[in-house]
Image (cartoon, grey):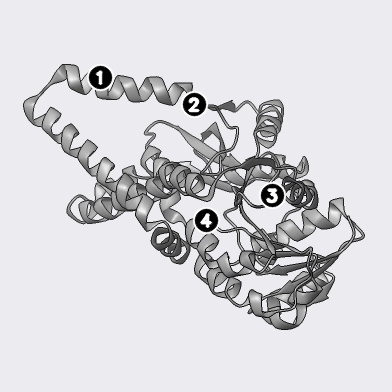
Amino acid sequence: MKGTVVIVGLGLIGGSIALAIKAKHPEAHIIGIDVSYHSLEVGKSLGVIDEIGESILIDGPKADLLIFCCPVKETEQLLTRLPGLRLKKDVIVTDTGSTKGTIMEASTALRESGITFIGGHPMAGSHKSGVRAAKELLFENAYYLLTPTKDVADAKVADLKQWLSGTNAKFLVLSPNEHDEITGMLSHLPHIVAAALVNQTQSFTEEHPAAFRLAAGGFRDITRVASSDPRMWTDISISNQKTLTKQLTIWRDSMNQALEMLESEDANSIYAFFDGAKEFRDSLPVHQGGAIPSFYDLFVDVPDYPGVISEVTRYLGEEEISLTNIKILETREDIFGVLQITFQTDEDRDRAKRCIETRSNYTCHYE
């Protein structure tokens, strides 16, 4: 497709979308706008964008596709300014925010002026941030949710999908309300629960210091999402306040029921509690993308001697296998330790397993 794409917010998400569009539509001209001029300079030097923009006021009217890759509240503020601009009649405006209700409200005046706005939410990320971390295939096989209002023509949704086809994402169309309900349950609530559990554990480790080291294993894994950007999650929580209030109330009631089961030593109810959770959890799709980005962990039994980590990473580096995280699990007491290596794709993990087992006698395993 030909045309001008204006991306507001040139970080990991905005930069990755720009690269995906350039790969699929090389004739498109991409303009970047960001509060950080340094990010724009880096993006231009890396070929992520073709032109450094000045502002929405100046560059917005040039756009055939206008994408907001900003925090939700900032996107809301910018959307309210668009009706006063002379945008192209056929422009498509979209965003990448994690909540949709308040954004759709902020876009009301824009939509009433005849401009097409389609809410968007690419459900992928990285432990890295900034335009330098942008990747053309960041969203490959991830879900990309679109939330058009009922009055948006199917042809416009198809056009947006075509613009974004270079992401190789799986597009799913939802209503704004359904989007917020689903992501609230599957992503936002788990982040709050994980943060609450970590905060409780912090106080606990002050009384029991040994717990700090023991938390390095499975506990650290199940609370991984608590390491997310607190500013972003403050923004998301407030934007999805209605849904989260409802889900947290249900969660609180469920925990009260669990407390009652424990106090009454009701073995049958406790068993049903865990068995029901296990049965449903085991039925969930494995590593097919979802509300929380998947990570692929490989566990390597390694001897405890200096240099073993550099040895393993050298094997991976020589075969150009990229990893996202690496750590030693500290709960083993024998001469072997467990090296946990995290990858972004299942394919990279499988390649790493073959690589390490071929070039060493270390045992590798994963769930």
Whole-angstrom CA distance, mark 1 to mark 4, is 36 Å
Specify the amino acid type for callout 4. Answer: Lys
Looking at the image, tell me whether mark 3 or mark 2 is earlier in sequence order: 3
Labels 2 & 4 near each other (Cβ < 8 A): no
For this view, does 53 lie left or right of residue 302?
right
- Residue 41 visible from this viewpoint: no
Q: What secondary structure is found at the residue carrying circle 3?
A: loop
Looking at the image, tell me whether mark 3 or mark 4 is earlier in sequence order: 4
Which residue is found at the position 52% from the left and 34% from the top? 303
Which residue is found at the position 68% from the left and 34% from the top? 352
- The answer to which quarter of the image holds residue 347 is top right
Which residue is found at the position 28% from the left and 55% from the top? 199
Q: What secondary structure is found at the residue carrying circle 1?
A: helix
Q: From the image, which quarter does the N terminus lie in?
A: bottom right
Q: Nearer the viewer, mark 1 or mark 4?
A: 4
Q: What secondary structure is found at the residue carrying circle 2?
A: loop
Write down the residue under mark 4: 100
Does 363 sit above or below residue 16?
above
Labels 1 & 3 near each other (Cβ < 8 A): no
Specify the amino acid type for callout 1. Answer: Ala
Q: What secondary structure is found at the residue carrying circle 4?
A: loop
Write down the residue under mark 3: 138
Specify the amino acid type for callout 2. Answer: Leu
Write down the residue under mark 2: 284
Instruction: Give the image location of residue 244, x and y in percent.
Output: 35, 51
Is disc 3 surrounded by few (<14), some (14 to 19) or many (20+) residues within 10 Å?
A: many
Specify the amino acid type for callout 3. Answer: Leu
Is disc 2 surrounded by few (<14), some (14 to 19) or many (20+) residues within 10 Å?
A: few
Looking at the image, tell me whether mark 2 or mark 4 is earlier in sequence order: 4
Q: Nearer the viewer, residue 70 or 137?
A: 70
Q: Nearer the viewer, mark 3 or mark 4?
A: 4
